[in-house]
Image: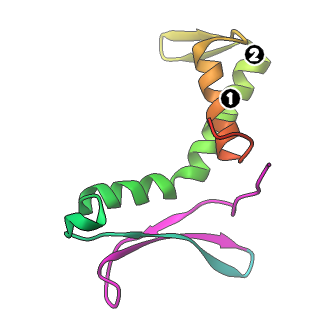
Amino acid sequence: MTHTHTPGPWQLEEPHEPTPNMAWVWGSTPGKDTCICNVLVTQDPEWGVSPDEALANACLIASAPDLLAACEAIAARLEEAGHLSYGLRTMTYHEDSDVMVQLRAAISKAKGESDA
């Protein structure tokens, strides 16, 4: 099933009072802010990851719309032009290359089209 996500950009709000153990990821829709998720940030090992890892996870979540847009742009550029140049290197497009398979899988997963 395909899903439509809250448009980016998304922002990370680090823990602060009155919720010092919670980081928030916010997105914007016309006329309102939308809570994308909250991430527990605690020193208690029973609750999972370290505070640094929890904040890193929140940063990754907040960057999701930007990462999806970058993957889509790279895939489109490779499909249209047949290559992608960066610096002195050139990546040539092959339909079944590892990079294209990985790009398509990541895009599909981000859009809710697959679990892979």
Q: Are marks 2 and 1 in contact (CB under 8 Å)?
A: no
Q: Residues within 10 Å of mark 2 (few under 14, many from 20)?
A: few
* Picture layout, residue 90 above or below residue 55: above
Residue 72's tag is none
Residue drawn at 61 percent across, 52 percent down: 65
Residue 86 image offset from top left, x and y in percent: 53, 19
Q: Residue furthest front?
A: 46
**How much space separates mark 2 and mark 1, taking CA atoms?**
17 Å
**Residue bearing the label numbered 1:** 104
Residue drawn at 70 percent across, 38 percent down: 108
Tell me which amino acid carries mark 2. Ala
Residue 100 image offset from top left, x and y in percent: 65, 20
Image quadrant in which you'd find residue 105:
top right
Residue 80 image offset from top left, x and y in percent: 79, 20
**Residue bearing the label numbered 2:** 81
Residue 92 image offset from top left, x and y in percent: 64, 8
Q: Which residues are magenta?
A: 1-29
Instruction: Please identify the quadrant where the C terminus is shown.
Output: top right
Tell me which amino acid carries mark 1. Arg
Question: Element under label 2?
Answer: helix
Residue drawn at 33 percent across, 61 percent down: 55
Name which of mark 2 and mark 1 comes first in the sequence: 2
Horizontally, is 52 left or right of 75 in the view?
Answer: left
